Image (tube, rainbow, N blue to C red):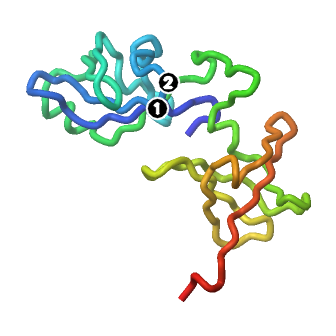
Amino acid sequence: MSDNLILVGQVGGAFGVRGEVKITAFTDDSMALVAYSPLLRADGSVALTLTGARPDKKGVVARAQEVATKEQADALRGLKLHVPRDRLPEPDEDEFYLSDLIGLEVRDVSSAVLGKVRSVPNFGAGDLLEIAPAGGGQTWYLAFTRANVPELHIADGWLVVQPPTVDETEVE
């Protein structure tokens, strides 16, 4: 994926039989997807040009120039939708985009370098940091919470993590 593209939604499939598309929005205001149109694929090509939408539980139900039938809409299920970063508002002083975390150096509370943030996935239970160890080896995940990540220094290129400890008596 291009570094300047931000993930804003994902196609959930068809809504009804007239070619409308369900889109799960990853934006604060799901209707903003219409203003960001056209929505792009990860390679930067146009995926959907929204011509109208209405709010839905997890996002929007939309009409798109590229989709005329239920079958076409269903064929897009799972498609991730992006917009160029420069089309999004600048985050406020204490805000950031999750993509800003990718590439940051990961340090522990004693400033020892543990690795770098490789990605920020969300498998349904909250955002995670995928961390590539500094010495190589298998990546590991850490829930992106204030307790686990007490300090963010995005402008300086690093963050501090406090991984939860495992109580040996609880492990069988």
* Percent of width and height locating residue 33: 42, 19
Q: Which amino acid does the dot numbered 1 rest on?
A: Phe
Q: Is residue 100 left or right of residue 73?
A: right
Q: Is residue 77 left or right of residue 40?
A: left
Taking the view exactly as shown, the residue that stands out farthest to the front is 169
Q: CA distance from mark 2 to mark 1?
A: 7 Å
* Percent of width and height locating residue 149: 73, 50
Mark drawn on residue 26: 1
SS under mark 1:
loop
Q: Residue at x 26, y 29 (%)?
A: 22
- Which quarter of the picture shows residue 18? top left
> 10 Å neighbourhood of mark 2: few (<14), some, or many (≥20)?
few
Q: Is residue 169 left or right of residue 64?
A: right
Question: From the viewer's perspective, is residue 122 above or below residue 73?
Answer: below
SS under mark 2:
loop
Mark 2 vs mark 1: in front:
2
- Which quarter of the picture shows residue 108? bottom right
Q: Which amino acid does the dot numbered 2 rest on?
A: Asp
Question: From the viewer's perspective, is residue 88 above or below residue 103?
Answer: above
Q: Nearer the viewer, residue 22 or 48?
A: 22
**Residue position marked by numbered label 2 in the rendering:** 28
Q: Is residue 109 left or right of residue 89?
A: right
Q: Residue at x 11, y 27 (%)?
A: 16
Q: Residue at x 63, y 18 (%)?
A: 86
- Which quarter of the picture shows residue 64? top left
Question: From the viewer's perspective, is residue 127 above or below residue 50?
Answer: below
> Which quadrant is the N terminus positioned in?
top right
